[in-house]
Amino acid sequence: MQANLILCGGRVIDPVTDTDAILDVAVSGNRILAVGENLRSQNAEMVDCQGFLVVPGLIDLHTHVYWGGTSIGVDPDEHADKSACTTLVDAGTAGPGNFQGFLRHVIEPARVRILPFLNISFAGIFAFSEKVMVGECSNPELLNSHALLEIAEQHSDIIAGIKVRVGRYASGTSGIQPMLMALDACEELDLPLMCHLDEPPPDRLAVVSRLRAGDILTHCFKPFPNAPVRLRDGEIYREIYEARTRGVIFDIGHGAGSFSYRTCRAMLEHGFKPDTISSDIHCLSVNGPVFEQLTTLSKFLALGMSLNEVVDCSTRKAADAINRPDLGRLVPDCEADISILSLEQGNYSFFDVDNEVIESDQCLRPAGVVKAGNYRRLTGI
């Protein structure tokens, strides 16, 4: 066995292979070589991971990282390092009109892999800040399907899907029309749609009933209004069950206003767990309540999901949502993207978008990362 890197003695968790054991992970070039006991190779770099979690490279499925090009964006490498992420999925920060700048000035220079959803709006999310807030889908003049198709086809190697934001704030008087245009484009491109829904109109039923298998409903555990559950008695709406049966993907997309413990508890009590857990990191959530992806994942540990379930929601399931079976798993010949985490014990307080606080005795922290076979220490090792 010829490996250039071996991670030794960590608690390896890989939901794809149902692995949860103290093992070594060997890397050759930019590929996983082997997972097993007592792996050794001459001249390989050895990293002692005893006491740490070794998991597939974490994927944050909902971020806004067009830093410097839009007001909403945060620095991708800074967010990735704080979260030990190897892949960030940008949720439509750029549209056809500014995608080239996003690609040249952010995606290409970044250490972390960035896979974007392309916004149906020509300008992307161009005015999102404390001082100026304009819904990019509220102006029909910014919606052009031909421009969308041109950029999506030109960059089909990197674009993961199409993003649309609808609701009273995001689409205004345009209502559900931007979503219908985006769905039409997705059919033409054979790509998934990621849909943001804020306050009505449109309402939950109009939006969710139109989502197809493989489409992503982000902000899936949002508070009232347009919550997925009737909060007074905890009953989940029929269209939500029907969407899951159809194969719609339910993504958290925490953000500054889109994740409520009250909603989450009601959903979990019915056994309705999220498919993917993502941060929706942006300029208004980075200093709280989100902070970074590991804090978001830690909230679900505090809410009763198991460590293996939480890891699955930010690895295999996130990779499958963007049709990247080479990511999010520790399987020989897959991309050597690996996250090394510490599960710290102590007293932690986590708050949601309604400022409700929950207490926990554990929190996930970054320790190291392997990206395309290259190891970097973050903290703790």
Image: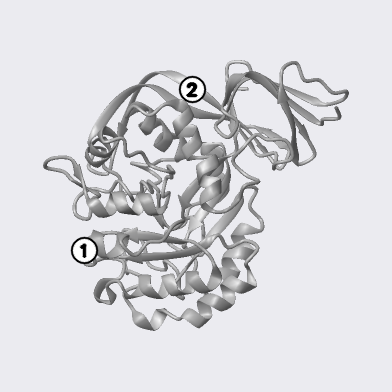
Labels 1, 2: front one: 1
- Quadrant hosting residue 78: top right
Quarter in which the N terminus is drawn? top right
Mark 1 or mark 2: which comes first in sequence? 1
Three-letter amino acid code of the residue under disc 1: Pro
Helix, strand or loop at mark 1? loop
| Cα separation between marks 1 and 2 | 39 Å
Decide if residue 327 is on the left or right side of residue 253: right
Of 297 and 64, which appears nearest the observer?
Answer: 297
Of 85 and 159, which appears nearest the observer?
Answer: 159
Of 288 and 275, which appears nearest the observer?
Answer: 275
Coloring scheme of the render? one colour
Decide if residue 200 is on the left or right side of residue 134: left
- Residue corresponding to mark 2: 343
Whether residue 284 is visible here, answered yes or no, is: no
Residue at 47 percent of width and 39 percent of height? 313
- Residue corresponding to mark 1: 200
Q: Residues within 10 Å of mark 2 (few under 14, many from 20)?
A: some
Quarter in which the C terminus is drawn? top right
Residue at 36 percent of width and 49 percent of height? 244
